[in-house]
Image (cartoon, rainbow, N blue to C red):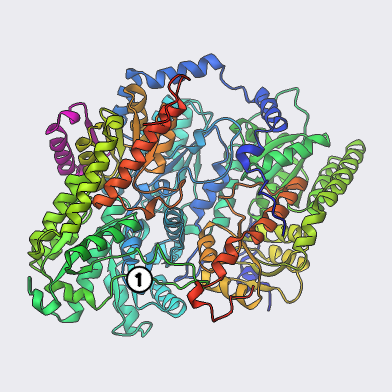
Amino acid sequence: MSKDKLDIPDYNTLFSEHRFVEQRLNKQQFEAPCSEQETAEALAYSKSAEYMEKNFSRKAVVINPHKACQPLGSIMAALGFEKTLPFVHGSQGCNSYFRSHLSRHFKEPTPAVSSSMTEDAAVFGGMNNLIDGLENSVALYKPEMVAVCTTCMAEVIGDDLSAFIGNARQKGVIAEDFPVAFCNTPSFVGSHITGYDSMLKGILSYLYERSGVEAAPGRGEETGEKLNVMLGFEPYTGNFAEIRKILDAFDTKYTLLGDHSGNYDSPATGEYEYYYGGTKLEDVPLAAKALGTLSLQKYTLRKTQEYISGTWKQQISALSAPLGITGTDKLLEAISELTGLPVPASLTEERGRVVDALTDSHPYIHGKRVALVGDPDLLIGLIGFCLETGMEPVHIVCSNGDVDFDGVKFKEEAEALLSASPYGSEAAVYVGNDLWHMRSLLLNDPVDLAIGSSHLKFAAKDAGVPLIRVGFPIFDRHHMHRHPIIGYQGALNLIGLIVNTVLDELDRNNSGFNYDLVR
Amino acid sequence: MDPVRKEEFDSGACGSLAPKTKACPRPKPGEAAGGCSFDGAQITLLPIMDAAHLVHGPIACAGNSWESRGALSSGPSLSQYGFATDLNDSDIIFGGEKKLKESIDYIAGRFAPPAIFVYSTCVTALIGEDMDAVCKEAADRLGIPVVPVNSPGFVGSKNLGNRLAGDALLQYVIGTGEPEPEMQPGVNLIGEYNIAGEMWDIEKLMNSAGIAVTSRITGDARYKEIAWAHRARVNMVVCSRALLGLAREMESRYGIPYFEGSFYGAKETTYSLRQMAYLMNDRDMERRVDRLTEREENRLAQDLRPYRKLLKGKKAVLYTGGVKSWSVISALKELGVQVVGVGTNKSTEDDVRRIADRVGDDTEYIPEGGASRILKTVKERKADIMIAGGRNMYVAMKEQIPFIDINQERHKAYAGYEGLLRLAKELTYSLANPVWKLAASPAPWDREAPPYDR
């Protein structure tokens, strides 16, 4: 084989060649494009306060949404359990979107199947599709549990999952004792995070109720002093590693309720298996006897938290993403409180090292104005991190902090957090808004940095703001999800990302006399 | 193995305008299925770059799909915006028509697009939204075309969606405009979406032979040029049987002859260019095409020599949307790569026949999806490389199989003569990368077993 460099131009370079540029210019002759002046005027108008007002009074249309739908979250939740096959009950396209979406983020395959409903199902109901689908998928993919969620279509025609699955058992398509957890996840309600919550609750309650185990809160001695931990809709496999590291440092035993890190971080061994890792199914009923439950996404996991405190009668510590020093401090305090164990010295030491790193970097980020986009729990964490490092959150957009869906409480908390710090005085929190709103905000009231998913890159580019990729989805960068953002290590990763972006910008924009070697 | 699937005999050709029974093969419940009709319709129309594309439905269909296709634009980018009505539960109960109307008005007012395409989804079709009426009313009031695309996901496969999008173009767009007087009549390219800029390579070739492109349907298209598509002299259906119905209908309505062709591989490219000139009924043009193709083929043969040597006898498994399979096989064959397995899950009867014409008897047909099925073929046939789309890419990585992305997310253009050279290079590089050796050798302390022989 030749040892040449890969010299096949990709489209960025190939089509910048003169012959293609010329070809495109020729095409413009009959395109009748706007004049440069008109374009400039339109761009200027889109930056104006007048347009921003119009944009924010927009009620009907969503432009560039920053949320995905419920079943996508359900699939992630299902993949958190051992040998569990996610099953989407509805028309086939949804499932292929979910698989692409998750695979593009994690760069890993996503096993999930669909009941492939078509218009006859729309008329007569999807029962036959569900029954055939269960039979086929169990035979093909040999799961130990199937986790069924619905799509809009199944919800609109009113399919009854519980009855259909019962009928499948009666017909002998699946064995009487074969576990099939399920939940309802219409996409016209909520978002990917509510879907995650519904499926997690669906699986926990299903496995618990059929086990015959009696909930016995705090009976740690029976379960080996275990703690339940839920990470929620977690786009970072690195965060699972980090939480394990922290819990191991405490020397407490724990059950992660929902752990998809195995499925999304499996080794290349030359042999692809369908299922990797995940919470063991038999651990779920025992989780009802745990010392307590730690939830790291309190807005995402509302239903599951309610279930655990209501049915399992457990003490719950519900936090948002533990980002930064203060966020991680709260996490360690919560673990300490739930387990009765002191915070280990190794973590205190790590804290000191990361605080040191933050002090090293603070001159370059102090007073940086920041725009934030993300899911509610991530945003609470990010806001806290910005404030403690002297960055000033300015625009905060949360597409799925819908006003009619607990958005108000999220907004209240975010605003309280911001108003408690002088660095939060300029901030405004927008729930149920989209990235087109964010674009108006960025153009009208410029910031230094944007923090959010890959989807934010278009608005950020229009506004000439560097984007720091945090959250979900990150399609256009590799391996970001492998590095934790929670815990002290996560704080170090985040500050590294942010300060080095700032320094890159300084170098990029240097005017020749200050191309500093030392910073 | 019998390459032709029974249900396709029953169903009539997927691209046919008058299917005998069902339009396209039905997906099987319980499998990891491909895209739906909504997806197919969007893929067909989104490359109309200056139009606005509004999804009427809950957030999912738009939220999971906006800005993630690789159809490139040479100018406008409005098509890349994710517009959605984002219906919620009360809209499902009381209807979303008002929201739709307001959405159309907002888009027209703010973005001033030449046209708005409005897509139905499973939900809006089920609750019986009268999208056609809303679109018509808005079009009359706003004075711009507002085109309803009735292709909800549940009606079937992606191919059917392509076809329904074609129907929408026929019904609402083609024939509604006239080309600039100075434009010379030429060829419509149907079903070429400018993935990774392939359309630009093709256009360059056609222009060198003096063949004009009248309308791009729809790669890097502008709304206007589709409206005047009926003034073309020839239709070429590029690797997409699903839009064959569009070509057939244009033949009967406007008397435009059509042919099916491909630009993957030198042989197919030459054939396609010749066919254009022949159907244009222009002797001069035919001669120009002959000169051009001869020159290009000679140059290519020269450039390809070192790569052919390296690729000779290599085995590939090809798993892509059915329509592309046969043409990519041609290209691979020219490079000396043997296709030992080929996906036929989305292929029509004719596609499968074309595949059969191009591969040997011992090639395995992979009729249905699922990673395990593809992997089995790779292993059993000792394939050297897998050529497939994004959803299967990471499975290949897990199995340490060299991989080339051939579908919509790829960043390399493989069409035409130069495209074939790029494909040859990409194949050799992908096979030669030292990472495969690294991946295939176990850790030093586990070395007693011989490394996996590929």
Quadrant assignment, res A15? top right
Judge whether B370 appears above or below B247 on screen: below
Chain under disc 1: A
Mark 1 crowdedness (10 Å alpha carbons): few <14, some 14-19, many ≥20? some
Would residue B128 appear left or right of B4 to someone viewing this image? Answer: left
The residue that appears at 17% across and 53% down in the rendered structure is: A348
User: Which quadrant of the view contains residue A258?
Assistant: bottom left
- Residue A443 in the image: state x and y as whole percent: 37, 24
Three-letter code for the amino acid on which mark 1 is drawn: Gly
Kindly give the residue lying farthest to the front in the view shown: A518
Q: Residue at x 22, y 61 (%)?
A: A230
Placement of B388 over or under A446, stated as above or below: below
Quadrant of the rendered image containing residue A356: top left
Q: Which residue is mark 1?
A: A277
| Viewer-closest of A146 and B229 | A146
Residue B74, compared with residue A112, is above or below; it is above
Q: Give coordinates of residue A291: x percent, y percent.
A: 10, 69
- From where the camera sits, is residue A44 visible? yes
Q: Which residues are magenta?
A: A403-432
Please, what secondary structure does the residue beneath circle 1 have? loop
Vertically, is A135 above or below A390? below
Quadrant location, the C terminus of chain B:
bottom right
Q: How far across and down, in percent of the image, does residue B41 sit?
A: 53, 49
**One can see residue B93 in this view:** no
In which quadrant will I find the N terminus of chain B?
Answer: bottom right
Magenta: main secondary structure: helix
In magenta segment, residue A248: no
